[in-house]
Image: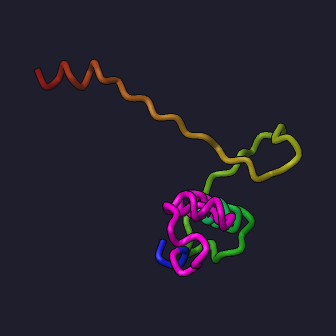
Amino acid sequence: MRATKLVLTVKHLTFKERLVQLKLPTLKYRRLRGDIIEVFKILTDKYDTNVTFSFKKHQDCRTRGHNLKLVNHRCHYDLRNISSVHE
């Protein structure tokens, strides 16, 4: 935020307007992009596998052209059972 105020031509604008004017991405976008890059590095074994968290890859042959598809684990909460225990 502070660095965008150093540009004299956009100093008077709000932060979002300065980002648009200077064609800069938001912090939320930069963090998401960084996370996606890190996941890609982990999946392609760019890091030491003994140190990093490993994702479980899909072992199905129907991965639509790539082998980096992740297994999606589903969580199931049975809230009725939990609430009946505490009553």
Quarter of the figure with the C terminus: top left
Report the residue at 47% width, 76% height from top.
2
In the image, 76 versus 24, the foreground residue is 24
Q: Is residue 42 visible?
A: no
Q: Main secondary structure of the magenta part?
A: helix
Give above or below for 38 relative to 29: below
Specify how the rendered protein is coloured: rainbow
Give above or below for 14 relative to 82: below
Which quadrant would residue 51 be assigned to in this image?
bottom right
**Image location of residue 39, percent across then percent down:** 64, 61
Residue at the limit of the structure toward the right, as seen here: 65
Give above or below for 38 relative to 60: below
In the image, 22 versus 71, the foreground residue is 22
Left or right? Give the position of 43 relative to 14: right
Q: How many marks?
A: 0
Report the residue at 20% width, 22% height from top.
83
Which quadrant would residue 43 be assigned to in this image?
bottom right
**Image location of residue 42, percent across then percent down:** 66, 66
Report the residue at 50% width, 62% height from top.
15
Residue 3 covered by magenta stretch? no
Part of the protein shown in magenta: 5-33
Left or right? Give the position of 1 relative to 36: left
**Image location of residue 85, percent across then percent down:** 17, 23
In the image, 36 versus 69, the foreground residue is 36
Q: Is residue 2 visible?
A: yes
**Image location of residue 81, percent across then percent down:** 26, 21
Left or right? Give the position of 65 relative to 22: right
Report the residue at 69% width, 50% height from top.
57
